[in-house]
Amino acid sequence: MYLIAEFREKDTVAAAIRLLRAGGIAPADLDVFSEEPIDLPRGVLERPSRMSLVSVSGAILFGALATAFIWWTQNDYRLVTGGMPVFSFWATGVITFEMTMLGAIVGTFGWFLWESGLLRKRDRNAPVPTVDPGAMCLRVRCRGNDIAGALDALRRAGAGDVQREGEV
Amino acid sequence: MATAPDLLPYDRIRADLFRPLSRVSRRYMLATLIFFLVGAAGLVAWGFQLRRGMGVTGLQRPVFWGVYIVDFVFWIGISHAGTLISAILRLTDAAWRKPVTRAAEAITVFALMIGGMFPIIHLGRAWLFYWLLPYPNSRLLWPNFRSPLLWDLTAIVTYVTGSVIYLYLPLIPDMAQLAEHNTPWRRRLYGALSLGWTGSDREWHALERAMKLMACVILAVAVSVHTVVAWDFAMALAPMWHSTIFGPYFVAGAIFSGIAALIVAMGILRKVLHLESYLTRRHFDRLAKLLLLMSLLWLYFTMAENLTVWYGNEPKEMAVFGARTRGAYAPWFWTTVFLNFVVPFVLLGIRRLRTIAGATIASASVLTGMWIERFIIVVPTLANPRLPSASSFYRPTWVEAAITVATFAAMAMLFMIFAKLFPMIAVWEFQPHPQEDD
């Protein structure tokens, strides 16, 4: 089941998350909803990301494929170059660069869709709270014996209204 | 005792920024129709050119690059408004950028769409544009990847892809909000485009990371694209084109015209959409200072480019230099200097004149000046080739003029349609702030 608590201040959300985590709730079971990005203090609710790695990997992959493709096409039908090299990295460097950047762009966008969960809905049955402008909602996924402790933590942190959604 | 200024509340921000999407006035319809008709006239002119051939243009030996290439360079330059300005300000965390970036990113996408059409129009037999794509032709010959034309193709494809994503990413949270309260067809449109955005911290984190990475990548791409456009010229052994500073010269000119386009667009949006509380004098003042800086940089590059040619006194280059500064193209050259340096220097350099109207006028002057500057770069070199007996004079025809004017109308029309479909200021980035007086 889920507990949804509304907060007005960023500090109270951070306090609630700290208390919940101290009570054994995993970060994967916590979600903060808001209409604008919230910068919580470091260490409160870290979301590790591989986006930079994917971006660089996409860049290397596209750049390598483009260079290999150009090398192959230039050798597949050799033009008369008057003694100049059939494949010249310098003369095709611009295309390699652009394709490298395209790989970074495609990698970043693709990983954004994946990491944000917009493509793979992590939990389709999870309730999505309606957030008032300026407010924040903390959604906690609880297992049977966590509920009382989570409720207590949310109230101690200063949550206004706490709603229960879903079945235990 | 001074009192704290009132904050613009969330409800007011949403109402102000979403309001333009729900109302379509008669004036808006009329203006869109006029732009559409002008754009359609350009399509008719293009159709005429396709039917009759390139002979209907003013292009003839030795000037085979004319207004179409000028338009191409100009619009690709304008496209630098979004990526460079938005990306630089985002990476440097400049808080004042927030009301400015959406318009800049939209300008980028539309300018690229328009600019990217010109090589196809210039081809003459436009239906054969797919020959540029990397596939083997009937004799199994692949495209020549050493050709700057292929560089252009890949650079522009990368830039368009990146710019569309860079515009789309920060639109997602706004579209999710719009999907909640709107007419049925808009709900479906925004619902589909927002991909089921819920506003969770995972989504925000991913969005912010993606925007930062995209800003880094798009900066490199934007610089490379205009450098490649410059290399279309500089790689040719033509007088006054074969120059090592052409890359940075073009990039500086592109940023210059991009900022000018952004200021003009902001000036119009502010008035038409009643965004006086959001696009304030402070925003115009900062962009005007950037424009002034770029004006001085443009003058520096122009001086460096022309002075070295004059001092070198190489006959072939002096023929082009003479045509530009004293000959048939001199009025255009000096008009460029006036519009790109004198007007902005006076209107933006003198603090009292650096108002919203002053900045908008200076920007319009720069846009005109930059189009003429592109003409001055492209045409005199071709009209004065290395073989003096082949010299000629180029005068565009009504077909080229109609297509050029149509692209400006198309830009205005696309921008107006965009402003009715999407908020011109990123609502989620806009927290309550003190209301400013102009």
Image: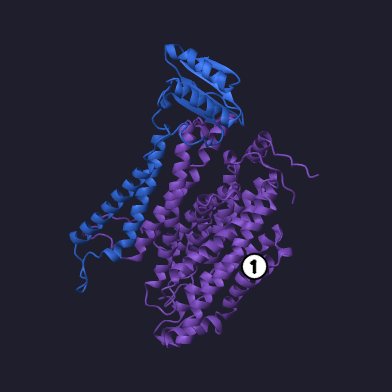
Give the letter of the chain under mark 1: B
Secondary structure at numbered mark 1: helix
Q: Is residue B331 left or right of residue A147?
A: right
Q: Is residue B37 left or right of residue B69?
A: right
Query: Which part of the image, by quadrant, shows the N terminus of chain B?
Result: top right
Q: Residue at x 56, y 36 (%)?
A: A36
Q: Residue at x 45, y 20 (%)?
A: A23
The residue nearer to you, when weighing A130 against A159, is A159
Colour chain A appears in: blue
Q: Which chain is represented by purple in the image?
A: B
The residue nearer to you, when weighing A28 against A120, is A28
Residue B299, x across and y down, in percent: 56, 73
Q: Is residue A40 above or below residue B288?
A: above
Q: List the residue tagged with mark 1.
A: B344
- Is residue B140 in view? no
Specify the amino acid type for callout 1: Pro
The quadrant where residue A54 appears: top left
Q: Is residue B359 above or below residue B438?
A: below
Q: Is residue B429 above or below residue A44?
A: below
- Its colouring scheme is by chain
Q: Is residue A53 above or below residue B230?
A: above
Q: Residue at x 40, y 59 (%)?
A: B126
Q: Residue at x 27, y 53 (%)?
A: A64
Q: Is residue B14 left or right of residue B136?
A: right
